[in-house]
Image: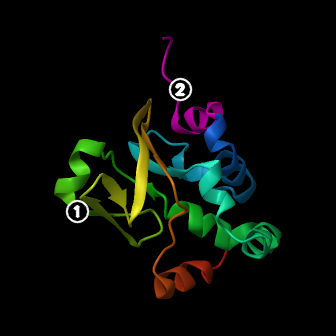
Amino acid sequence: MTDKLNIIETIAKLEKFSTFSRLLGTSGANAIISGAGPFTVFVPTNDAFAKIPDTLMNELLNELGQVKLEALLSYHIVPTRIDAVNMGTIKSATAVSGQEVKFTDVSGIKVNGSNVQARNIEATNGVVHALDTVLTAPAAAAAAVANKPAL
């Protein structure tokens, strides 16, 4: 294999992540993971996004500036490297959005109850794990993030 790709390129090259990749670009959330890292990105598959009601997806996509979408995506990004083998022992981490993401390792590794389908997908500036469900941040914290002024 040739040189590793960064996280944005790694996500973009995998078809099962095409929805997340597109949303990173339209919302501007890709800027969060364009630095040196390391980052851990929990990427919902296209099938995970298909579980979201169309009305909610349309609301996120049509919002001016896509602030809520960027907040949702930033909840899937942790500003440190977390390999799957460590998730069961560290129990939680703080996402870029400021909210906590919880890990369990009972009947398979889970992030906030979402199954980790593919793990430790390497990138030059971190690691990617595939999820079967889109993570939702705790409501009160999500509202605070969504109401922050755009930069």
Q: Is residue 13 magenta?
A: yes
Horizontal side of residue 30 vs 93, given as left or right: right
Can I make out residue 98 in this image? yes
| Residue furthest to the left | 89
Residue 80 location, x and y as percent?
34, 49
What residue is shown at x 62% (from left), y 84% (from top)?
147
Q: Quadrant of the C terminus?
A: bottom right
> Which residue is labeled 2 in the image?
5
Residues rendered magenta in the picture: 1-14
What residue is shown at x 44% (from left), y 29% (from top)?
124
Q: Earlier in the sequence, mark 2 or mark 1?
A: 2
| Mark 2 touches mark 1? (CB < 8 Å) | no
Residue 85 location, x and y as percent?
23, 43
For the residue pair 32 and 75, the one nearer the viewer reads as 75
In three-dimensional space, the C-alpha distance between marks 2 and 1, rounded to whole angstroms, equals: 28 Å
Horizontal side of residue 126 vs 143, given as left or right: left
Disc sitting over residue 46 in the figure? none
> Which residue is labeled 1 in the image?
91
Residue 1 location, x and y as percent?
48, 11
| Residue furthest to the top | 1
Q: Nearer the viewer, mark 2 or mark 1?
A: 1
> Amino acid under label 2?
Leu
Can I make out residue 151 in this image? no
In terms of secondary structure, where does tag 2 sit? loop
| Residue furthest to the bottom | 140
> Amino acid under label 1?
Lys
For the residue pair 13 and 15, the one nearer the viewer reads as 15
For the residue pair 94 and 50, the one nearer the viewer reads as 50
